[in-house]
C-alpha cells in the first residue's frame, strides 16, 4: 500500500458536531436577516409621511370661515420656499392634530397677492408670521419666525380657555420676505425688530 492511499484512509469525515454548529450558525444568520427585513418593511409602512406646507395649506380653515365661526384662530403667513416654514411643518401638523377641534388653523401664502391686504394689516415683514386671533377674530398676539412647538402649544392652551397668552410677540428665525407685486418694502425705523421692513402700496 502506498503512502497516499494510507493518508486517505486516515482522513475521517468531519465530526457531526462541526456540521451541526455550522448549520445552527447559518440558521441564526438567516433568521436575523429575515427579522431585520420584516422590521424594515413594517417600519417603512408605519412611518407617517412628513408634513408638507402644501398639504397643511390645503387642509387649513379658510380665513373667511375662521373670522366668523366663533373659534379662536392661529393664522400663519408662509411661502413654499420658506425654509423656516418648512422646518416647522411637522410641528404644525402635530399641533393641528391636537388642537384642530378647538382652534382654526389658517395658512395664507404671501406669494398670493390676494393676501396683500392682510399682510399690510398684520404688518407681515418676515415669515413665518403667526397671528393669534380671539373667537371674535381680533388679533391678540403675534409671533415671527421659527417657534418651538411647546411655546405655540402653551399659547394655544391659553387661547382656547380665553386667558392671556404666556408668550406674546415672540421672535425667531425667519425667511426674508420679498416685496409683493404692487408694493414697495422700505426699512421701518420705528420698529424694534431690526430685521423688519414696512410694506407700502404705491
Image: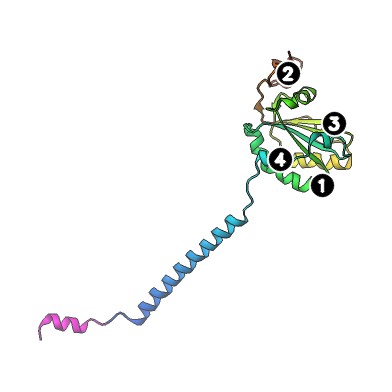
Residues under labels 2 and 4: Cα distance?
A: 27 Å
Tell me residue 98's x, y (percent): 77, 48
How crowded is the residue under tag 2: few (<14 C-alpha within 10 Å), some, or many (20+)?
many
Please tell me whether residue 5 belongs to the stretch shown in magenta: yes
Front of the two marks 2 and 4 = 4
Tell me residue 132's x, y (percent): 81, 34
Vertical comparison of 154 with 124: above or below:
below
Indicate the secondary structure of the residue bearing disc 3: strand
Front of the two marks 4 and 3 = 4
Which of 168/62 is in front?
Answer: 62
| Quadrant in the rendering for residue 110 | top right
Q: Quadrant of the C terminus?
A: top right
Q: Quadrant of the N terminus?
A: bottom left
First-in-chain label (1 vs 3): 1
User: Residue 58 has which mark?
Assistant: 4
Residue at (40, 75) in percent of width and height = 23
Segment colored magenta: 1-12
User: Which residue is under mark 3?
Assistant: 140
| Quadrant in the rendering for residue 4 | bottom left
Vertical comparison of 184 with 78: above or below:
above
Front of the two marks 1 and 3 = 1
User: Which residue is under mark 1?
Assistant: 101
Instruction: Please tell me whether the stretch drawn in magenta is mainly helix, strand or loop.
Output: helix
Q: Are marks 1 and 3 in contact (CB under 8 Å)?
A: no
Tell me residue 190's x, y (percent): 76, 15
User: Which residue is under mark 2?
Assistant: 199
Residues under labels 1 and 3: Cα distance?
A: 20 Å
Residue at (88, 42) in percent of width and height = 161
First-in-chain label (3 vs 2): 3
Which of 76/54 is in front?
Answer: 54
First-in-chain label (4 vs 1): 4
Which of 118/150 is in front?
Answer: 118
Amino acid at each position: 500500500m502506498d503512502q497516499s492511499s494510507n493518508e486517505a484512509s486516515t482522513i475521517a469525515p468531519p465530526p457531526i458536531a462541526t456540521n451541526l454548529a455550522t448549520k445552527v450558525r447559518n440558521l441564526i444568520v438567516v433568521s436575523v436577516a429575515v427579522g431585520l427585513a420584516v422590521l424594515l418593511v413594517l417600519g417603512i409602512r408605519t412611518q407617517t409621511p412628513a408634513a408638507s406646507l402644501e398639504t397643511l395649506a390645503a387642509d387649513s380653515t379658510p380665513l373667511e370661515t375662521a373670522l366668523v365661526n366663533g373659534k379662536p384662530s392661529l393664522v400663519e403667513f408662509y411661502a413654499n420656499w420658506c425654509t423656516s416654514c418648512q422646518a416647522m411643518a411637522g410641528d404644525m401638523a402635530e399641533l393641528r392634530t391636537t388642537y384642530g377641534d378647538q382652534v382654526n388653523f389658517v395658512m395664507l401664502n404671501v406669494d398670493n397677492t390676494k393676501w396683500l391686504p392682510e399682510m399690510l394689516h398684520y404688518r407681515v415683514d418676515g415669515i413665518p408670521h403667526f397671528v393669534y386671533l380671539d373667537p371674535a377674530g381680533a388679533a391678540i398676539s403675534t409671533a415671527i419666525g421659527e417657534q418651538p412647538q411647546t411655546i405655540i402649544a402653551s399659547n394655544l392652551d391659553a387661547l382656547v380657555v380665553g386667558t392671556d397668552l404666556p408668550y406674546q410677540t415672540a421672535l425667531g428665525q425667519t425667511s426674508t420676505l420679498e416685496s409683493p407685486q404692487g408694493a414697495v418694502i422700505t426699512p421701518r425705523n420705528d420698529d424694534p425688530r431690526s430685521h423688519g421692513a414696512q410694506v407700502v402700496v404705491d
